[in-house]
Amino acid sequence: MSIPYLFRCPISLDLFTDPVTLSTGQTYDRPSIEKWLADGNLTCPVTMQRLTDTTLIPNHTLRHLIHRWLLADPGVNCRHTPVQSAGDSDAGFSLLALKQKLQSSNTSRADKLDCLEKVRVLSVESDIGRACLIELGFFPLLLQLLFRSSVVVDSALAEAMLDCVLSLLASAQLDSLDMLKEHARLTSLELLLDQGNTKTKMSLCHLLEVIAASSATRELCLVVGESRRVLQALVSLLHDQSRIRASEAAVRAISGMCSLEPNRSHAIRGGVVDGLVSHLSSPTPRTAAPALATLELLLTLEVGKKVVVEHSDAIKVLVKMVFRMSTVDHEGSEHALGSLLAVCGESEKARSEAMDAGVMTQLLLLLQSQCSSTAKAKARGLLKLMRPLWTEETRSYEKDDRFHTPGYY
């Protein structure tokens, strides 16, 4: 979009987000002039006058003019628009016109993509612009366009719409997201998670993470948490090690959803335990800590413990994480220990598997490390649980005749 030159900061050359005026009478965008002054410059960037007073006065008049320009109707008489430079032929740019284009079924795909890019840039680069977009109802509009039918939206359009939605999230009223409780719109979300491209899936994971984190969308999170297709799509991402960033985004989404207790049983039935174990089995999972924290939450349910005990790799993976995580993230180590305590405390099979996986070595290494006091307390608790097996194993070695044969060592 073309911006009238009076609405551009002389330093950044971008649209003002927070115009402030210096004692010289020159106006700058607050972030730009604050950086200029922080770098030790004591002159006005435009006039080069030495500043004896560096007070920044908010320019409310200019802010108001920019606000009016952004909201301007296409039919407004040009003499009411702000002063513009010769090259700013598009100064009549209107958010209302953008909104109408996005709503119209006659707008071409290319034009819609162009409109969405303008919305994205404005929402990212200008606080004023973002506020205007929210005021004009762009957030619910974008949600309606994105989740509107049982047919997957064009991948490029879906990507662009999600970029805009995520850019507006911080300023939007999140109760607009409640439209996803409607069956048709929830189905659309499920289809996008299942059939969308990688970037779309990652963006949807971030959206689910935000939904889970807000009290305003708690009921929506419970509705989404019951969706078998949503869980299947997220678990599929957990298993896909070829797209590790998408897998990490799925961990964060699932972690958020499982923060609500009613969602945990649905997650277990949906295969989340197997997905988390698969994710933790990857070489360097950057989201190991939240994955382990989620696993520990799921083990507060008996059905969760049963799934872990019956899983062929879960105990081995948890044992591996005990000391490995202590060198990276103390909380991750604590969660791994918490999970092992939960299953080993009630299952002889789990204790035996943990012993075979080398849990004693992991615990002893951990106790000699600079781990947290919480991790050490949990490690001592697990050692106490494992002591009978350790003693039994030691005795079996002592009874083995090979150990008493000269020259065996």
Image (tube, helix red, strand yellow):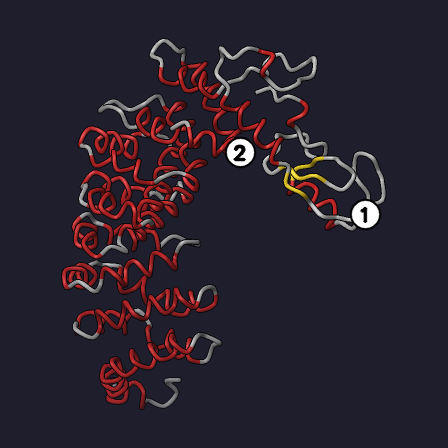
Q: Can you give x and y, in whole percent of width and height, for residue 269 in the image?
A: 16, 50
In the displayed orientation, state which residue is furthest to the top.
106
Which quadrant of the rendered structure holds the N terminus? top right
Circle 1: element type: loop
- SS under mark 2: helix
- Mark 1 packing: few (<14 Cα in 10 Å), some, or many (20+)? some
**Residue lying at 45% horizontally and 36% vertically, measured from the top left:** 167
Q: Which residue is mark 2?
A: 128
Judge by depth and name the residue closer to the eye, 335 or 145: 145
In the rendered image, residue 279, in percent from the top left (x then y), is placed at 34, 51
Q: Quadrant of the C terminus?
A: bottom left
The numbered mark at residue 351 is none
Q: Earlier in the sequence, mark 2 or mark 1?
A: 1
**In the rendered image, which quarter is residue 217 located in?**
top left
Residue in the foreground of this view, choosing between 103 and 389: 103
Query: Could you tell me which residue is drawn at 30 percent across and 40 percent down?
Result: 175
Q: Residue at x 82, y 43 (%)?
A: 43
Residue linked to disc 1: 42
Nearer to me, 195 or 14 = 14
Spatial CA distance of label 2 from label 1 is 28 Å
The picture places residue 369, in percent across and down from the top left corner, at: 47, 77
- Identified by mark 1, the residue type is Leu
Q: Residues within 10 Å of mark 2 (few under 14, many from 20)?
A: many
Residue 223: image quadrant is: top left
**Residue 136: horizontal and vertical position, in percent?**
41, 27
Compared with 13, 245 (above or below) is below
Three-letter amino acid code of the residue under disc 2: Ile
**Above or below — where is 73 with respect to 282?**
above
